């Protein structure tokens, strides 16, 4: 019997996977241009490179307008403000996502309403969305998760039926397409993150996409401290904004990343499919989440794998992950936890009084909220493989699969 590395055996892999983030002379050239311009900040807004980047990014996703912003969390706050969200309005969000998807509602004095996700892809369940709608509902924020896209056909249909705003959370989904339409171009807004771990990164930063010129102008005003300046002064009233501008140095990096987006998206999709086929052919009880046939370009940020403990002699997922890491392959299990159960989502009604009617003293561990599919994914099923694992060679992918095989064949050592 082969000994697992966790107990002193030889690891499957001892060399690191591909470094991240990737960069080359494109980034150097844009950074040098920004440096020499001596216009390093984001003011006046939009700064020269920011205007260029916004349009290039929008074009890459089939949207009319792209608006650079400080990060991919405040993008959604700005979107909610731009649509005129008011205190006490409800915003439907999936429970299985990063906190920004829901905290954006809290921070504009609205109320996040959590719904469960679909078993097939861990994206927002449209049936749960429709069941959660009340007279207070104003917006829906579907999340395109991992390598999947939420069911935009049904979500948009529901939104039209109930006159709701749709803000696509595309933090994972740069370059993805649904029925030939880019993510971020189908709803009223798309929100993208450029944070360090994302498919496209400038360290920090974000982008809003929209096809509505009034929403574009309002968003730009909100990002620029509420100023109304030529190009975004054609709407009525005055908005209460803040400084959410992206610096010219960050935009320089983002420009280069956008220029290679199509190329790296194609490579990621091919590697994702290769890994799926290798894994499914060699290991029982693990399953890469299905790709909806309506996805016409796969973005493949995180490869999410469902784990069935019965195929590993009852070994819990977390124990499996510990053994896998010892073999030189680091994947995540609790990459996301349902937001109503995660400590950093400690939104209390003493600070955010609009939550009280639905959540009492606070959201955290509120007994009124239950999303069984999200909880099962978070605590028992989901294995998250990050994008850099798809950036190298087929041998890298086979090494990962070999580690799975080794643990499955020796699972009794973990019991």
Image (cartoon, rainbow, N blue to C red):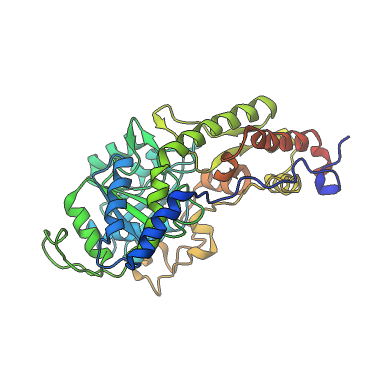
In depth, the one of 323 and 395 nearer the eye is: 395
Res 275 → quadrant: top right
In depth, the one of 64 and 31 nearer the eye is: 31
* Residue found 29% across the figure and 70% down from its top: 242
* Residue found 45% across the figure and 45% down from its top: 116
User: Percent x, y for residue 413?
Assistant: 84, 42
Outermost residue to the bottom: 350
Asked if residue 15 can be seen in this view, the reply is: yes
* Residue found 77% across the figure and 40% down from its top: 12
User: Percent x, y for residue 215?
Assistant: 21, 54
Asked if residue 79 can be seen in this view, the reply is: no
Res 227 → quadrant: bottom left
Above-or-below relation of 177 to 27 = above
* Residue found 15% across the figure and 68% down from its top: 238
Q: Give the position of the N terminus as an image quadrant.
A: top right
Q: Give the position of the C terminus as an image quadrant.
A: top right
User: Percent x, y for residue 386?
Assistant: 57, 45
């Amino acid at each position: 019997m082969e000994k697992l590395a966790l107990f002193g055996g030889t690891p499957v892999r001892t060399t690191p996977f591909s470094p991240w983030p990737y960069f080359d002379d494109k980034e150097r050239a844009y950074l040098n241009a920004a440096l020499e311009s001596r216009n390093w900040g984001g003011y006046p807004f939009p700064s020269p490179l920011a205007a260029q980047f916004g349009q290039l990014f929008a074009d890459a996703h089939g949207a009319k307008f792209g608006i650079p912003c400080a990060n991919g969390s405040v993008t959604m706050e700005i979107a909610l403000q731009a649509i005129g969200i008011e205190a006490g309005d409800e915003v439907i969000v999936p429970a299985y996502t990063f906190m920004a998807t829901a905290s954006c509602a809290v921070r504009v004095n609205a109320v996040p309403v959590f719904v469960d996700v679909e078993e097939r892809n861990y994206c927002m369940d449209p049936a749960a969305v429709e069941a959660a709608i009340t007279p207070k509902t104003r917006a829906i924020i579907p999340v395109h998760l991992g390598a999947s896209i939420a069911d935009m056909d049904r979500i948009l249909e529901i939104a039209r039926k109930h006159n709701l705003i749709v803000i696509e959370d595309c933090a994972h989904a740069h370059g993805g397409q649904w029925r030939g339409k880019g993510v971020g171009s189908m709803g009223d807004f798309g929100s993208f993150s450029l944070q360090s771990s994302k498919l496209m990164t400038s360290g920090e930063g974000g982008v809003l996409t929209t096809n509505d010129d009034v929403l574009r102008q309002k968003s730009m005003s909100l990002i620029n401290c509420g100023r109304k300046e030529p190009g975004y002064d054609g709407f009525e009233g005055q908005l209460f904004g803040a400084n959410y501008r992206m610096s010219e140095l960050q935009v320089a990096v983002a420009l280069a990343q956008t220029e290679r987006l199509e190329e790296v998206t194609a490579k990621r999709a091919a590697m994702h499919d290769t890994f799926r086929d290798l894994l499914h052919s060699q290991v029982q009880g693990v399953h890469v989440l299905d790709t909806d046939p309506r996805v016409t370009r796969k973005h493949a940020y995180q490869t999410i794998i469902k784990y069935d403990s019965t195929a590993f002699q009852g070994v819990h997922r977390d124990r499996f992950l510990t053994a896998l890491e010892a073999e030189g392959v680091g994947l995540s299990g609790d990459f996301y936890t349902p937001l109503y159960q995660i400590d950093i989502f400690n939104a209390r009604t003493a600070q955010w009084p609009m939550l009280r009617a639905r959540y009492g003293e606070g959201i955290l561990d509120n007994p009124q909220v239950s999303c069984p599919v999200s909880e099962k994914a978070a605590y028992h099923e989901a294995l998250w493989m990050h994008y850099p694992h798809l950036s190298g060679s087929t041998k890298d992918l086979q090494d990962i699969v070999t580690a799975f095989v080794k643990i499955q064949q020796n699972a009794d050592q973990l019991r």
